[in-house]
Amino acid sequence: MTPMMHDDRLIPFLIEISSAIGDLSRAIGTHPDEFLNRVYPPFLSRDELLAQCHACPELGRPDTAVSVSPDGSLEAIPYPDLFPELRANILIRISRALPHSTHPPMTDYLLGVARYFETPAFSNYLDMSALWMSTIDLPVIMPVVSDETYCDSRCGLKGTVDSAVFIADSQLTETLSLPSRSWASFLKRLPIAVDALPVAGMSSRVYRTAALDGALPNMKLRAWNLPNPHDVRRIKGTHQIIIYENTRSAFESDLKPALRRIFNSLTVRHTDDMLFDGLIRTLSAHELGHNYACFANARSLNDRHDTFEEMKANILPLLWVCFCLESGLMALDDAVAAICVYLALDLQDCILARETLSRRCYCLATALQMNYMLEHDAISIDNGDIRIDLNAIWNSNLDLLRICMAIMANGDRDSADRLIHSYGSISPYQKTLDRMIAASGSV
């Protein structure tokens, strides 16, 4: 569908709403220690909490704090109820925006956001998420989600309430046409799990950022796969948001200075434009990968869930590039560029994880994949220099995907821990990380 023209008058009001939601997110606690102290009773063990959450699903909602009632039982308090003044400010901002909304899908969505913050029942959260999916063909979008359990190292259940305002970039979105149009054919080459939760459909777009103040502090967010609830994805599908500014910044400041220092496979034929296009495409494939083989039992992995979810989504872009090369959809130089820049992006997460707790599951996912490929000769590392073998990349990652899917399908925590024990160290490629830090000036 061709995007409608956007009304510039609405954008400042959407930014105000997003900023007000960001105030709520920061009040919940953007620092991991503050977050855990805010959302869980400190004296309860993980097993005790999970047992209670199983008995009372409200306690396991991603957007509720867990509190102790006077009789000693646990109760769920939705985040908006914790901060009535901040909720009131959000509702005021929405009321100011509504008269300036000229597209019915956006108006309906804003009313849905208001209903959720007025009465934060989970049914209203699901309705809000479904209404957002009706706005994705508009040129301006404002997702509101309870996203990213990565700050929740205790149970892996809770997220903050995040929001942002994005403006579609139709020209850059053309770069995503290859993953979008080839994805269905690619999936036919993979071992599809019959008990995976279905997704109605998928779409992708590159966006320019109007406001990111209300979203994922310290995450260096480059892409978003929304909405989060599988009940909504099953009916409405998903939308992949690729954020141009953050992606371009990561490429220019962190990746481009380091790429030719760490990958022997790159030559002068691999231009900067080729590398950036590879980054955009593999980022899209990563987000599309979050919709593949989603298992209800995967949540039984608890705090390990996010690591294996990210590893699954890290594996699929490499397999997709190999598929495109084999199918004649991508030239050899483009395939090498895409794989190298994507692996560099994953390695960058290991650097970010030193300072940001929310990146540690990404780092562990990268370690599992890198070390498995190293053991199976898909990559070789010599004093920090990485060389890739495309044939072995396909075979090793397909094997690792099968292992990952079996662990997630069964919620097999013991097997997850054994895999982490065998492949979870960053030591084999520490010199590569050191080279990246020296090249980019990362702290």
Image (cartoon, helix red, strand yellow):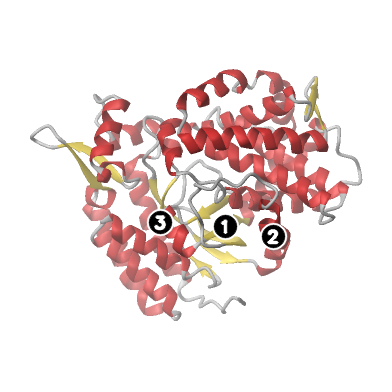
Q: Would you say the residues marked 1 and 2 are in contact, meaning their CB atoms lie under 8 Å apart?
A: yes
Q: Quadrant of the N terminus?
A: bottom right
Helix or strand or loop: what does disc 2 sit on?
A: helix
Q: Residues within 10 Å of mark 2 (few under 14, many from 20)?
A: many
Q: Would you say the residues marked 1 and 3 are in contact, meaning their CB atoms lie under 8 Å apart?
A: no
Asked if residue 409 is positioned above or below residue 435 in the image, the reply reads below
Residue furthest right in the image: 268
Disc 3 marks a residue whose amino acid type is Asp
Residue 258 visible: no
Task: Residue at 27% x, 52% y: name it.
Answer: 80
Residue 301 lies, in percent from the top left, at: 44, 32
Counting residues from the N terminus, which is met first, the one under dot 1 or under dot 3? 3
What numbered label is drawn on residue 231?
A: 3
Counting residues from the N terminus, which is met first, the one under dot 2 or under dot 3? 2
How far is the residue under mark 2 from the one under mark 3? 26 Å
Residue bearing mark 1 = 240
Task: Residue at 55% x, 51% y: name it.
Answer: 291
Disc 2 marks a residue whose amino acid type is Leu
Asked if residue 278 is positioned above or below residue 302 in the image, the reply reads below
How far is the residue under mark 1 from the one under mark 3? 17 Å
Asked if residue 164 is positioned above or below residue 75 in the image, the reply reads below
Q: Is residue 215 left or right of residue 419?
A: left
Q: Is residue 14 left or right of residue 120?
A: right
